[in-house]
Image (tube, helix red, strand yellow):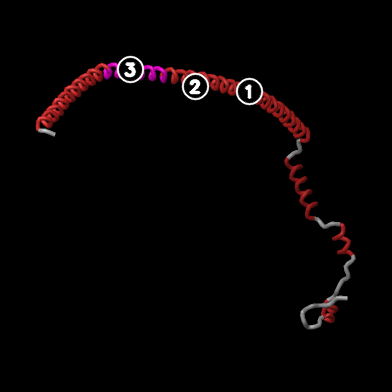
Amino acid sequence: MSAENRNFTSMNTEVQLQLSNIRIAQLLDELSELRKHSGASHEAELREQYSRERESDRAFYRDQLACMEERHKQELEALKESYREHAEELKRNYKESNAQLKRQLQSMSAQISTLQNSLNASSLSEAELKALDRFHRSQRFKRSSEQTRLLKNKKEVSRSQEKDDFDGDGLSQSA
């Protein structure tokens, strides 16, 4: 290759490089323009999407709260009904117990009045009560008929018989 050719080629390469740089600069400008426009529009799109998602979330949680509120109302009504039934049952049991206690009280009052009447009818004097008490005590501590019979049938052992029966070891042997 000749020097001219080399110059032409190198010049050609330089021109191509300059043209390439110019084209790159143009493309960068277009890209920045697109980014400006698309960045703003993209940001707007993101904001819009975010607001839609946020509204969707709010609607979801509103529905959840409404469901929970309804469920809690139903549970509260069920508890109220259960408490009412329990209170009615307690009232009923109280009335039954109260009536039963009144009947028992009337029965005991009747027994008390009967006992008072019998006490008033028998009214023994104090001296009679003391004599009756002495009699009961004497009956309690008196000899039984068997004890009395045994004491009557007992053989009398004299002192001389006891001495004869003595064997020396301290134990007497009676026949």
Q: Do the residues labelled 1 and 2 touch (CB within 8 Å)?
A: no
Q: Residue 101 carries which label?
A: none
Magenta span includes 48: yes
Ranked by sequence position, the earlier of labels 2 and 3 is 3
Q: Which of 135 and 67 is in front in this view?
A: 67
Q: In which quarter of the image is the N terminus?
A: top left
Q: What residue type is labelled 2?
A: Met
The image quadrant where one finds the C terminus is: bottom right
In the image, the segment drawn in magenta is 38-57
Residue 68 is labelled as: 2
Helix, strand or loop at label 2? It is helix
Question: Which residue ends up furthest to the right in the rendered image?
Answer: 153
Q: Which of 73 and 167 is in front in this view?
A: 73
Question: Which amino acid, by three-letter code, is at mark 3?
Answer: Glu
User: In the orientation shown, which residue stands out farthest toward the bottom?
Assistant: 168
Determine which residue is flagged by label 3.
45
